[in-house]
Image: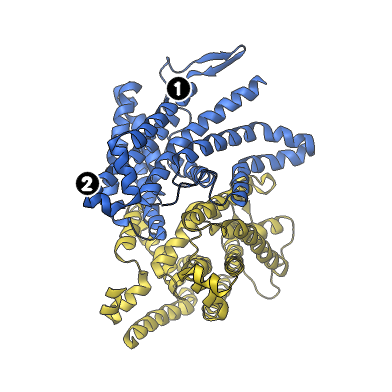
Chain colours: A blue, B yellow
């Protein structure tokens, strides 16, 4: 039972991470109608920046804000150089253009940081476990991820729904020309939104960095999972992204932890050992297929524009 | 119009003549590297041609087309590992399984539109990838070596020129099939649905069924390409359908010119030859290729095929 609770917490933590990624993706899609495959590259860059900055400054607390600023900057530069020209184009163009960006960033990282991955060590004060229940100690760091992401989610909500900037963003999403005609610099606004999405992706990357190896291609694998989340949650909806992220995170983690045992109950040992790894890694895709059959627009479709 | 046609005809004709005569050149010069490279190009051009059918003519932007390469390849690989080496058995099974997989994926994906479709096809392809990686009995992540190429009686696939000509014949057959298909009533419905789905629906066409049929045809054709690819490399691993491969196929289609019969072939030649050339300049060739793709998207949207129009008839290209 304790093991189950621990796995649930792991699932929540993965879900939170996915939320950081999908929030940026869905924000960019909802507002600029842009499919950004290179979102995973920004996630990767966030992780690499942090790993390097920690090595230089020797302090996670200094490295994190700097890395965030750096990804924000990279995002804004990418927007000005490339993305800006892709708004209003076919989705196929977005796919191709950002695919080109992925190739570019992956190779750039290989050039700058080398082909071997990096590891980011946690400072001692984060690298321990606290008892969350009698008999169950849980790593502090994972709890920190969960807590910080909830704060980010609240911040996003407040930003979009409660500030003047958020009002402009929402207005820009429903009628770009009108907002421009009212004297708002819509181009700058879009650059900012893209940068915000990039920073969110970078944040996800830097949070995940101490848990996994920082390596080339880390962004793409999680990006595809993020797509699954978006399909389940409904595109353009941040609330949907939040719920679906948790859902997918928990299902994936629990599936990997318990599915093999479950199979062993039903099948012979050998058959279960063969089928389990494949089946538990496709669980979320099956979930996605099921959602598609029942609700083709996702669980929380954004109100139509 | 007439000049545009002739520029295109000349270029395509020259390319075809080159492809036909390549083995002769290789035999004379004794340099078989080019033949190996072009066998690969021709095989991937076949996959791109199949993608062009749904993407170019049908407007279905599938980002998971490499999955069928994997299915076709694994069908051959698994059968070979189990001792079934006859091509007469392997290839039909590869085609049927690819068609079935395309049918299932299409049933789910074609319920959706636009960005959803892109993401979902990608996700399904990833799922197929994980299934293949989980096949511990057949090498899992590491893949599966194929010790004997498909056996076709008198046809020896291990002979490089023979295999090359087989691939080329199949490619040209596929290009012919697609060009006939899109001119048929079926193809008109598919293209009509791309331009205006509601109108086609209002006329009374069951669009979903038409699209699904088209999707399955493309998947099957790509499965054939997978069977060829497995034979070409004597090896099959999940990497054959890694998601970047799907991206490559889209790049080929767009680079060649969307919705033109020979476009995918031109695109495949251009992309893979470019990769080969760039990789000789620097090992970090992707840092050049990436921005290049972006530039093509931004400024040369109609690909090489559009370039022919620009050469033959500048004004027409401007308007488009």
Q: Tell me the distance, in whole angstroms, between the alpha carbons under discs 1 and 2.
A: 38 Å
- First in sequence, mark 1 or 2: give its number: 1
Q: Residue furthest top?
A: A134
Q: Residue at x 49, y 22 (%)?
A: A143
In the foreground, B241 or B86: B241
The residue identified by callout 2 is: A184
Q: Residue at x 41, y 34 (%)?
A: A205
Are discs 1 and 2 both within one chain?
yes
Count neighbours of disc 1 (C-alpha within 10 A) and say few if under 14, some if 14 to 19, many if 20 or more.
some
Locate residue A229, reporting x and y percent. 52, 42
Q: Is residue B40 left or right of residue A82?
A: right
Q: Closer to the camera: disc 1 or disc 2? A: 2
Answer whether residue A176 is visible to the viewer in this image.
Answer: yes
Screen quadrant of the N terminus of chain A? top right
Locate residue B47, reporting x and y percent. 53, 66
Q: Chain of mark 1?
A: A
Dot 1: element: helix
Q: Is the residue B313 above or below the residue A188 in the image?
A: below
Answer whether residue A75 is visible to the viewer in this image.
Answer: no
**Which of the labelled discs sits on residue A144, or is there none?**
1
**Which of the labelled discs sits on residue A124, or is there none?**
none
Locate residue B53, reporting x and y percent. 52, 70
In the foreground, A219 or A75: A75
Q: Is the residue A42 above or below the residue B94 in the image?
A: above
């Amino acid at each position: 039972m304790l093991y189950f609770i621990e796995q649930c917490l792991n699932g929540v933590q993965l879900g939170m991470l996915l939320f950081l990624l999908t929030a940026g993706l869905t924000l960019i899609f909802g507002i600029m109608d842009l499919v950004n495959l290179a979102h995973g590259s920004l996630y990767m860059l966030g992780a690499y920046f942090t790993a390097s900055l920690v090595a230089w400054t020797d302090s996670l607390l200094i490295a994190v804000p700097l890395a965030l600023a750096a990804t924000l900057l990279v995002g804004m530069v990418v927007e000005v150089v490339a993305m800006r020209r892709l708004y209003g184009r076919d989705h196929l163009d977005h796919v191709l253009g950002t695919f080109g960006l992925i190739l570019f960033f992956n190779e750039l990282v290989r050039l700058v940081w080398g082909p071997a991955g990096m590891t980011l060590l946690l400072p001692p004060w984060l690298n321990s476990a606290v008892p969350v229940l009698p008999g169950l100690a849980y790593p502090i760091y994972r709890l920190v991820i969960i807590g910080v992401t909830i704060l980010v989610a609240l911040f996003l909500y407040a930003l979009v729904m409660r500030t003047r900037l958020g009002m402009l963003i929402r207005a820009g999403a429903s009628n770009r020309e009108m907002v421009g005609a009212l004297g708002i610099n819509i181009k700058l606004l879009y650059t900012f939104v893209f940068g915000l999405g990039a920073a969110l992706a970078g944040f996800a990357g830097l949070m995940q960095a101490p848990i996994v190896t920082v390596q080339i291609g880390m962004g793409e694998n999680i990006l595809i999972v993020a797509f699954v989340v978006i399909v389940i949650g409904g595109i353009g909806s941040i609330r949907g992204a939040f719920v679906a992220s948790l859902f997918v995170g928990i299902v994936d983690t629990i599936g990997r932890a318990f599915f093999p045992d479950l199979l062993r109950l039903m099948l012979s040992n050998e058959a279960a050992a063969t089928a389990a790894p494949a089946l538990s890694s496709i669980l979320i895709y099956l979930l996605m297929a099921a959602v598609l059959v029942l609700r083709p627009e996702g669980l929380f479709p954004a109100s139509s524009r | 119009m007439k000049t545009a046609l002739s520029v295109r005809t000349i270029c395509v004709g020259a390319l075809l003549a080159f492809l036909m005569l390549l083995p002769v050149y290789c035999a004379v010069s004794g340099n078989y590297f080019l033949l190996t490279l072009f066998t690969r190009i021709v095989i991937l051009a076949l996959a791109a041609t199949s993608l062009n059918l749904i993407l170019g003519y049908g407007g279905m932007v599938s980002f998971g087309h490499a999955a069928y390469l994997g299915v076709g390849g694994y069908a051959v690989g698994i059968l070979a590992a189990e001792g079934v080496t006859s091509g007469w058995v392997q290839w039909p099974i590869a085609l049927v399984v690819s068609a079935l997989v395309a049918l299932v994926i299409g049933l789910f994906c074609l319920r959706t539109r636009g960005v959803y479709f892109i993401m979902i096809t990608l996700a399904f392809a990833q799922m197929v990838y994980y299934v293949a990686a989980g096949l511990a009995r057949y090498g899992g992540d590491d893949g599966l070596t194929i010790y004997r190429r498909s056996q076709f009686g008198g046809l020896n696939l291990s002979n490089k020129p023979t295999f090359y000509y087989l691939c080329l014949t199949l490619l040209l057959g596929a290009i012919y099939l697609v060009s006939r298909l899109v001119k048929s009533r079926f193809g008109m419905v598919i293209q009509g649905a791309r331009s205006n789905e509601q109108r086609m629906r209002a006329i009374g066409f069951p669009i979903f069924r038409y699209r699904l049929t088209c999707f399955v045809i493309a998947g099957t054709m790509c499965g054939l390409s997978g069977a060829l690819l497995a034979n070409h490399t004597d090896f099959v691993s999940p990497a054959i359908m890694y998601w970047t491969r799907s991206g490559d196929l889209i790049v080929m289609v767009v680079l060649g010119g969307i919705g033109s019969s020979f476009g995918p072939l031109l695109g495949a030649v251009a992309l893979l030859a470019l990769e080969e050339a760039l990789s000789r300049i620097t090992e970090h060739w992707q840092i050049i290729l990436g921005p290049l793709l972006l530039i093509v998207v931004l400024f040369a949207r109609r690909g090489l095929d559009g370039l022919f129009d620009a050469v033959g008839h500048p004004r027409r290209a401007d308007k488009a």
